[in-house]
Image: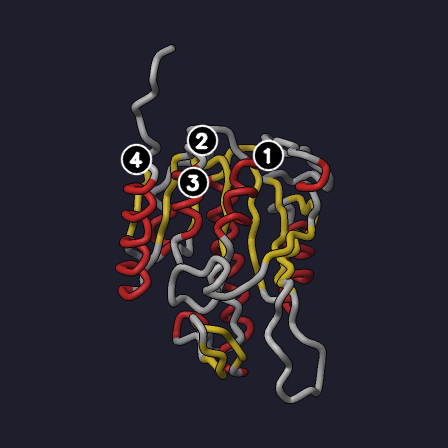
Amino acid sequence: MKTITKKPVHRIVKWDCLEVMKKIPNNYVDFICADFPYNISNNWWWAKVWDKIRKYDFWEWDKFQTQDDYLDFVFKTCKEYKRILKPNASAILFFSYNYAGWIWYELQRKKLFSFRQPIIFSKSNPLPKYKKDSFRSCYEIGIWLINSDKEYAKPKTFNFKSQPMMKNVMSYKIGKDWWKQTNHPTEKPEELTQNLIEIFTNPWEIVLDSFWWWGTTGVASFKSWRNAISIEKEDWFYKMIQERQKRAEKLNS
């Protein structure tokens, strides 16, 4: 049997995602997995950074002057997604719970995408509620979109795994002791991301992450034998996740 020595290609670009995506050809990408800024830092938020729990401002990348500015950014980005995605290719986009439902409704109403299902990242060990004035926050919402203007569209690729794995509520423990590998406050589990990549793509296809943040999508793509394009404009994140990518490639070489 012939041994495959070729490795997936991971293109890492440090620049504004909207400018970079303008240079990507039409119908080029097979899957997009992206965690948008949540636009919640103006409210201050409890977050766990490594082993410390504190009120946390997610810095300037998560702040917009107005809600309209934020939504304008979201829809400009999604229009580029539609152009560069192949027909009926899928995207999983994570948003704060107070935006997710309205965004998918508007994307479908404007015939940019067909909404299929929510994907729930459930936290089995959520942070305590210190003020005890509301429920503990136990989940984040991803929306599954298909690049089609039809109300109901079939995905280009959908690799159904076992019945227990194919639940749209995916539960993981949070924090450094379980899977956290960077200092980014909103890092998603690598297992979650890799699972989505393997469901929506086949080996050697192209995965795009326009907000590289913590580097999980690139690492998960590499481990799944998918090619990847990752975009990140913040210096600190860019340097941090370059190191993470190098470690992953060394361990899996």
Residue named by callout 4: 253
Image quadrant in which the C terminus is located: top left
Circle 1 residues within 10 Å: few <14, some 14–19, many ≥20: many
The numbered mark, 4 or 2, whose residue comes first in the sequence reads 2
Q: Which mark is residue 205?
A: 2
CA gap between label 3 and label 4 equals 14 Å
The image shows residue 79 at horizontal and vertical percentages of 51, 49
The image shows residue 8 at horizontal and vertical percentages of 35, 33
Residue named by callout 1: 88
The numbered mark, 3 or 4, whose residue comes first in the sequence reads 3
Give the camera-side residue of 25 and 131.
131
Which amino acid type corresponds to the residue marked 4 in the rendered image?
Answer: Ser
Based on the displayed image, in which of its 4 quarters is residue 43 positioned?
bottom right
For discs 1 and 2, the disc positioned in front in the rendered view: 2
Give the camera-side residue of 44 and 132.
132
The numbered mark, 1 or 2, whose residue comes first in the sequence reads 1
CA gap between label 3 and label 1 equals 20 Å
The image shows residue 93 at horizontal and vertical percentages of 56, 53
Image quadrant in which the N terminus is located: top left
For discs 3 and 2, the disc positioned in front in the rendered view: 3
Taking 29 as reference, is 149 left or right? Answer: right
Which amino acid type corresponds to the residue marked 2 in the rendered image?
Answer: Glu
Q: How is the image coloured?
A: secondary structure
Which amino acid type corresponds to the residue marked 1 in the rendered image?
Answer: Asn
- Among all residues in the image, which is located at the extreme front? 177
The numbered mark, 4 or 1, whose residue comes first in the sequence reads 1
CA gap between label 1 and label 2 equals 14 Å
Residue named by callout 3: 221
Give the camera-side residue of 166 and 24.
166
Q: Is label 4 in contact with label 2 (beta carbons under 8 Å)?
A: no
Based on the displayed image, in which of its 4 quarters is residue 6 positioned?
top left
